[in-house]
Image (cartoon, coloured by chain):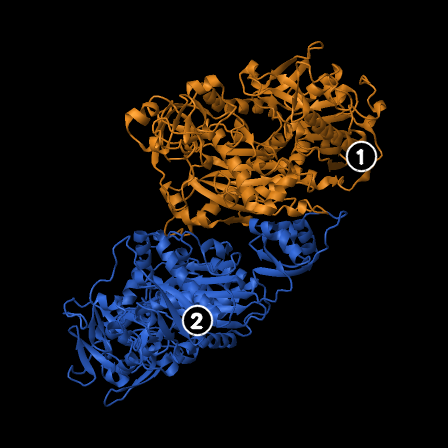
Chain colours: A blue, B orange
Amino acid sequence: MGKCTNHSDIETSYLCMKHNIYLCDECLECRDPDIYCKFRSSCPIHFISTKDFESEPGKSTAKELSIVFQPGDIKVTVQEGDNLLEASQKANLYINASCNGKGSCGKCKLIVESGAVEHKKNAMLTRKEIEKGYVLACQAKILDNLSVIIPEETLEKKLKTIGMGKEATKKLEGLVSQIDPMVKKYTLQLEPPTLEDTVSDLDRLKRQLNQNGCDIHIMSTGIRVMRQLSESVRENDWNVTASVLQKKCSSEIVAVTSADQEKRSLGMAVDLGTTSIVVYIVDMLTGDVLSAASGHNSQAACGDDVINRIVCSEKDGVKKLKKMALSTINNLCLRALESLSESHKNIENIVISGNTTMIHLLLGIQAKYIRREPYIPTISEFPIIKAGHIGLKAAHYAGIFVMPGPASYVGGDIVSGVLYTGFCKESDLTLFIDVGTNGEIVLGNNEFLMTAACSAGPAFEGGGIRWGMRAESGAIEKITLDPETFKPEYNTVDNKAARGICGSGMIDLLSEMLFKGVLGQDGRFRIDEEHPRMTVINEEPAFILEFADAIDIEEDIIFTESDIKSLILSKAAVYAGFSVLLEEIGMDFSMVSQMIITGGFGQYLDIEKAVTIGLLPDMEREKFKYMGNSSIAGAYMALLSNDHRQQAIEISNTMTYIDFSSNTKFMDEFTRAQFLPHTESKLFPSVTQFN
Amino acid sequence: MGKCTNHSDIETSYLCMKHNIYLCDECLECRDPDIYCKFRSSCPIHFISTKDFESEPGKSTAKELSIVFQPGDIKVTVQEGDNLLEASQKANLYINASCNGKGSCGKCKLIVESGAVEHKKNAMLTRKEIEKGYVLACQAKILDNLSVIIPEETLEKKLKTIGMGKEATKKLEGLVSQIDPMVKKYTLQLEPPTLEDTVSDLDRLKRQLNQNGCDIHIMSTGIRVMRQLSESVRENDWNVTASVLQKKCSSEIVAVTSADQEKRSLGMAVDLGTTSIVVYIVDMLTGDVLSAASGHNSQAACGDDVINRIVCSEKDGVKKLKKMALSTINNLCLRALESLSESHKNIENIVISGNTTMIHLLLGIQAKYIRREPYIPTISEFPIIKAGHIGLKAAHYAGIFVMPGPASYVGGDIVSGVLYTGFCKESDLTLFIDVGTNGEIVLGNNEFLMTAACSAGPAFEGGGIRWGMRAESGAIEKITLDPETFKPEYNTVDNKAARGICGSGMIDLLSEMLFKGVLGQDGRFRIDEEHPRMTVINEEPAFILEFADAIDIEEDIIFTESDIKSLILSKAAVYAGFSVLLEEIGMDFSMVSQMIITGGFGQYLDIEKAVTIGLLPDMEREKFKYMGNSSIAGAYMALLSNDHRQQAIEISNTMTYIDFSSNTKFMDEFTRAQFLPHTESKLFPSVTQFN
């Protein structure tokens, strides 16, 4: 790249994007204000490294640097070379970074007011933002003492966790009639000991627990509590709160603390998805969702679907994937707690809902036999586990209830869905589909439950789609095309500038393109490559959803023929799944009273359009019901109520699993469904035929 | 100390005891064979450091040195400055060192064949031994590569652990009719999974356990087992052994291993005494004691009795005392296992019997309220604890049953004693005394049990007595005095050269001195200081038991007037205890059918002489029964049988504790008993009165 601007005899190492000057290593070392510092003090220099930056092993020369965040004047000391996201986490500022530091979600924007960072080139920042000193925290390597401003929109996102909580509270209201946590708290006034009453501290505590209606005969006590007990009771003048963790058929005194300590008992519900993870923080007294956070499962670095994750766990060890899921949950948890100013130590109850592979990997349990015939999970129904045993951020004694999963490819997330939607208690026949990265189907009522997985792939969650994304800020979730110009009119989540397209947006788009003649039923473009909305990328035609210039980004947002193909495969798998499951018990769509759809489509899922593309069967539209993320909703219910935890176990035990992997009927149906809406048009009488 | 022999201008640092030459630091550094190496290669130089040897902090200059042990050619690498006992432990040679490296037991004798060590001056080695190259491993700081021989007598001691086991097996035979361990093993042939039978690995295991008669409804599984399960069952072709730990009212699958692995399941019974610790390794199938080991509780460095231990734990933290007890038990365990060539991982069942303070400290539980009115222990009845949770050397999942203790000063060791001696099942009234460092008494039968502690002090265990020791190798345990010359005739444990005097020896001695007129009933010497067997030490008259020259040691073995005073206080406390306990329920010695004495006196306890000095009441001699270490015997019984574990809990709950600490009757009786045998001679009608 040539020579340094300041030292003409030295090879350049860095490029300042703002001032377009080249700097060398000496510039960074140099404290002469005429050379280096004139930039350093006045501008957030955006370096692009022009060579590898790694120091020799064993020769650690990292300096200690100090970062000050505004507002709040929060100081933190870091090592030279750390990235700014790590620094913010060290400062307990849990800035949203749902892509886990890959620079792809664009959420961790900060403004560097003074001091130098090295920033990788990134399309998520507009030119205007770069000029203003914006960086993506995860892409900014710290080279200097920094003064950093957390911009309004980033602060807003922090507040949003509370907003999400309020929304969830409203949505989930009335689901739980009586709160019955795993960890119950008893406030006790113990009789102080005398020479006449010399029973041990523990017996004294149990005596009082017994008087308060607690079954002490099945009760044990952990070594930690034993070690702290004598001081706990005396420091608090024999007025204490005992926390008792209820397990399957025994209980354990897990903490004895001050009785007047007015701390809230919190719960955490976790939807552990292959692609994304959602965390609710719940007040265990009122049942209110206090805050919520969601982000990408950082295991995504090991592949999009469960099979790839298992392959990775076999190669690199289960521990690696365990750590990844754990750190994602822990970060989301801390982010959700931060807005509440609550400590993670107040979380005493946890429910985790996820597919069988995700649960195995989170717990560090070998998952390799899940992908080998005859597809056996290690564990279906889990005992209550303590948070400290697996490393979840919570009270070390917090009880974790893991949603039981009936099979390797139908897991606890689906049991959550059945629990939440409640059709297992009705006599009407219901068809249930959760469209995540897999596509699990349940057919049944209060008499039976059949289930299968149809390998739909992650397309509807944005996986494998060039501009695909989850239904989060900036995702196109609703779209129509102008019949003449094909110019899209769209809504985005949070009405932010478009950053990609989510499931409901893709369904809209496919249906619109079909209707407006942009696309044939075979999934190929029918308009010319010369059309102003068309382009070619990697020798493949693509439809332009939004031009880069219009929203000040680096590249056009497009939808390619490969994207369309992926979507068609996904929707065909789902439809084939429905058909085969009904066939198995000699039924058809007409006998289904209700069709429940859950998953991460976004709130604007257009049923009509989903039928149009053949994702959903052509039934009376009033039979369809979109119910959002049912995995987190079921986890929430189980968090609050023992009845629901028991019901979850019952649902899992009732489910009969049908394996599609070696099912020829499924393969036939799958092939037949790879058309828009279907090769057999009579199955979709209400849908206009286009060819 | 003058100048170096080799370098006359340098201050000397070391003295070679054998060659009587002085060496300086340069000698040690120097490799010139004419200067330093001529000694190093040919003789085990016994250095005495003449200055502090510590290097500056942060300036570690320790060399790596290699030690070879013979027989067996066992090599180990150590740091310069390590002591030889540590080196032998590193080489897995668990040489007996019951004083825990204080250089006072003289058991860890090794011969340094070549290479140099720095050896502290120590009276346990005879001049002849020093000439032969003997060192005490614990006192020898390694300065060089060494070739070390383990002498015959040290090897013998290793074999002795098996001998002790055989003795114990014989003694304990018939006590347990049915073996029923905490960890039960089930060998299972599982049905391999098929596409038709896809239940999870854990459910498959439980299904089979259920068929084998195991109650799976109260069963949980730990995270470790879950993590290893899928591989365990498949690697072993679905033919596995499941270990199930039975807790109070639930059970846990703690291990799943190969079924054909022919490893023995071992148990460990521990008598955790204030002064000494005894460990039995037991075959859980046959009930045989395979080996045994005993040693001093290394907490002794923090004081002789429980009060001093508690004071120390308040000052330095409970952790310190926990570590000390733990490391003593672990070392004894490894020593006992070594002779069996068994791994500690095969120990799956553990019972620990000890007084309330010892148990608290071992488990890291605050003991400070034990010594404060109203003397409350934190815990009396313990849940089953896993070995891994407290750091005991055993399978991490091994179940530990802690003998329950009814009060702060009457602990699980006494419950063990009651369990073992079995009088709680008889209608006859029994008086039970355990003479350890405390002196606990139980009075009762199958209808009631009363108990008290009488603070007898550790005199009968050798504590606070100048030449006092436990009944171990070299302890004088039986003694008579020549009526003319007062020359003692004595037996020692193992018939080794005398090293001190144990409880039974002291009782003999006191009684003999009384009879032969050496001593008055007031505990003062009645013969002249000029007598050949008398001496004066620290301005105090003392009786010479053995002359140093006669057995080639450095100092005479003596018994001082202070020693006598200590013994009188101890025996008075015990006698006062008996009296007050009987008085409490309006009884007297005549109503007692049986008097059981346990504790570390040694096998030659002479009842007649114990009555003569007033330790035991003047009852018909056939009513007395000495039953040795009942704490370890009770622990052994509970180790093998659930009935006995339950019985122990029952015994503990039945016991009524009488507090002597604020009991004026006790103080009166204690004062009255401070005479030989007693101030009230009519209480000892059968004992000749001497004045």
Which mark, residue B580?
Answer: 1
- A495 or B393, which lies in front? B393
The residue sitting at the top extreme is B484
Name the spot of residue B10 as percent of width and height, x first: 36, 32
Quadrant in the rendering for residue B656: top right
Label 2 and label 1: CA atoms lie apart by 69 Å
**Residue A428 as seen in the image, left or right of residue A512:** right
Q: Would residue B58 be visible to someone looking at this image? A: yes
The residue sitting at the front extreme is B9
Graded by Cα atoms within 10 Å as few (under 14), some (14 to 19) or many (20 or more), the crowding at tag 1 reads many
User: What is the secondary structure assignment of the residue under circle 1?
Assistant: helix
Please, which chain is the residue tagged with disc 2 on? Answer: A
Quadrant in the rendering for residue B540: top right
Name the spot of residue B539 as percent of width and height, x first: 67, 26
- B650 or A305, which lies in front? B650
> In percent of the image, x 74 and y 14: which residue is there?
B516
- B13 or A639, which lies in front? B13
At label 1, the amino acid type is Val
> In percent of the image, x 44 and y 69: which residue is there?
A335
At label 2, the amino acid type is Ile
Which mark, residue A74?
Answer: 2
Name the spot of residue A532 as percent of width and height, x first: 19, 86
> In percent of the image, x 55 and y 15: which residue is there?
B549
**A474 is higher (above) or lower (below) than B643:** below
Q: Would residue A547 be visible to someone looking at this image? A: no
